[in-house]
């Protein structure tokens, strides 16, 4: 390992200089609130990607959510608008629109944002990720497709040595996918990008469906947000109740909604929340298994392991952190 790579123990140094890469649907919004309710976090920027919504809509949502949560000072950069190699910009499938709503934030809509999106999130990420001093690295947490990171690594391959381990929401190792029987949505949206990242040498921590389906939010908590009496509390309660209703239809018996993106952020800030398998990962790119994350058969015996795959989670401790941090952001 290069001496230049910032050690992950730097994550314990306050503040954590966080960059969120969001496809700005409902659970991405919950991750944003978690970040803003975390006293150890300095939110440096948001990069807005296609995925749950179009790229343009993701940027609008990120700006409007930051306005709602009282942080219009946080810059929002435009990320990729399509998967690697795609000819056209990406629009979500009808099934995704049913899950996250037309706006991406449930049935409600926020007022137009107070400022424009900044251009070239990929260039910004590559530049700032490389320029950050080892003592204050960027903690980059993608909760959408990995397209922006793959493009940034193409532009500046040394980025793989300059970022500390990145924690991403995506993939499924031991459980079925949520788009196909094999593939999870974020990896499914751009399997090539995810594969490029996973073989780039950049250390990763995968927070996928293996653990995110173990952390469930109920309407009891959203009722508390509504009772805060704030505009943000009401908006987040309505938005999340929409998401819970989708889970009640699609995953009856779960008792609430999965907290995919907030768990990835929480595990980036406090890796002791999850128990991980150390391995090397790849993404299947062909046929029915396209989008499946697997242990790389060619690197099984390598001593060096680039990836950590979260397979267990301290759900009660995470939920406690989630509720107190999000409430702080909404109050
Ligand atoms: O599979 C869950 C993931 O897909 C989450 O990040 C959700 O926001 C969607 O992007
Ligand atoms: Ca997401």
Image (cartoon, rainbow, N blue to C red):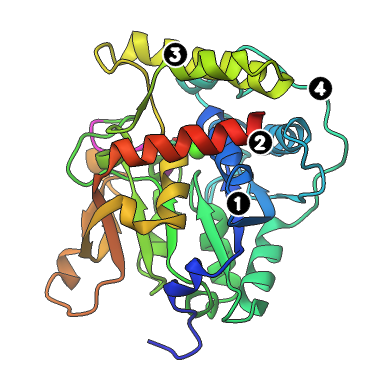
Say whether residue 56 is left or right of residue 246: right
Mark pair 1, 4: CA separation: 27 Å
Mark pair 2, 3: CA separation: 25 Å
Quadrant where the image shows the N terminus: bottom left
Dot in front, 1 or 4: 1
Mark pair 3, 4: CA separation: 25 Å
- The numbered mark, 2 or 3, whose residue comes first in the sequence reads 2
Q: Secondary structure at mark 1?
A: loop
- The numbered mark, 1 or 2, whose residue comes first in the sequence reads 1
Dot in front, 1 or 2: 1
Dot in front, 2 or 4: 4
Q: Secondary structure at mark 2?
A: helix
Task: Return the residue at label 4.
Answer: 111
The answer as to whether callout 3 falls within 8 Å of ligand 1 is no
Magenta range: 181-186
State how many labels appear: 4
Where residue 74 sits in the image (x, y, percent)?
76, 49
Q: Is residue 306 above or below residue 131?
A: above
Overall secondary structure of the magenta stretch? loop
Mark identifier at residue 39: 1
* 2 and 4 marks in contact (CB < 8 Å): no
Residue 250 visible, this angle: yes
Badge 3, how many Cα within 10 Å: few under 14, some, many 20+? some
Q: Quadrant of residue 176?
A: top left
Badge 1, how many Cα within 10 Å: few under 14, some, many 20+? few
Q: In the image, is residue 131 part of the stretch drawn in magenta? A: no
Mark identifier at residue 58: 2
Task: Return the residue at label 3.
Answer: 219
* 1 and 2 marks in contact (CB < 8 Å): no
> In percent of the image, x 49 and y 46: which residue is there?
145
């Amino acid at each position: 390992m290069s001496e230049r790579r910032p050690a992950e123990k730097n994550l314990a140094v306050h503040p954590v200089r966080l960059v969120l890469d969001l496809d700005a649907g409902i659970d991405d919004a919950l991750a944003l609130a978690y970040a803003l309710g975390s006293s150890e976090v300095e939110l440096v920027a948001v990069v807005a990607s296609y995925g749950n919504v179009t790229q343009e809509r993701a940027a609008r949502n990120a700006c409007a959510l930051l306005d709602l949560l009282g942080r219009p000072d946080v810059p929002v950069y435009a990320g990729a608008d399509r998967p690697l190699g795609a000819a056209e910009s990406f629009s979500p499938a009808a099934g995704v629109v049913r899950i996250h709503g037309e706006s991406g934030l449930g049935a409600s809509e926020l007022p137009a944002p107070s400022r424009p999106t900044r251009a070239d999130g990929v260039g910004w990420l590559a530049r700032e990720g490389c320029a950050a001093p080892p003592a204050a690295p960027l903690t980059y947490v993608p909760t959408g497709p990995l397209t922006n990171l793959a493009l940034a690594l193409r532009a500046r391959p040394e980025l793989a040595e300059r970022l500390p381990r990145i924690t991403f929401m995506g993939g499924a190792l031991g459980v079925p996918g949520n788009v196909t029987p094999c593939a999870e949505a974020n990896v499914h949206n751009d399997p090539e990008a995810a594969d490029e990242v996973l073989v780039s040498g950049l250390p990763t921590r995968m927070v996928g469906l293996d653990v995110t389906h173990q952390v469930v939010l109920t309407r009891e908590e959203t009722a508390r947000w509504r009772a805060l009496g704030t505009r943000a509390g009401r908006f987040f309660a309505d938005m999340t109740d929409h998401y819970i209703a989708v889970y009640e239809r699609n995953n009856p018996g779960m008792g609430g909604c999965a907290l995919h993106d907030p768990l990835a952020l929480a595990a980036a800030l406090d890796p002791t929340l999850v128990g991980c398998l150390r391995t090397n990962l790849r993404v299947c790119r062909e046929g029915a298994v396209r989008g499946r994350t697997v242990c790389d058969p060619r690197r099984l015996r390598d001593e060096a392991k680039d990836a950590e795959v979260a397979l267990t989670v301290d759900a009660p401790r995470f939920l406690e952190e989630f509720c107190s941090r999000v409430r702080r952001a909404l109050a």
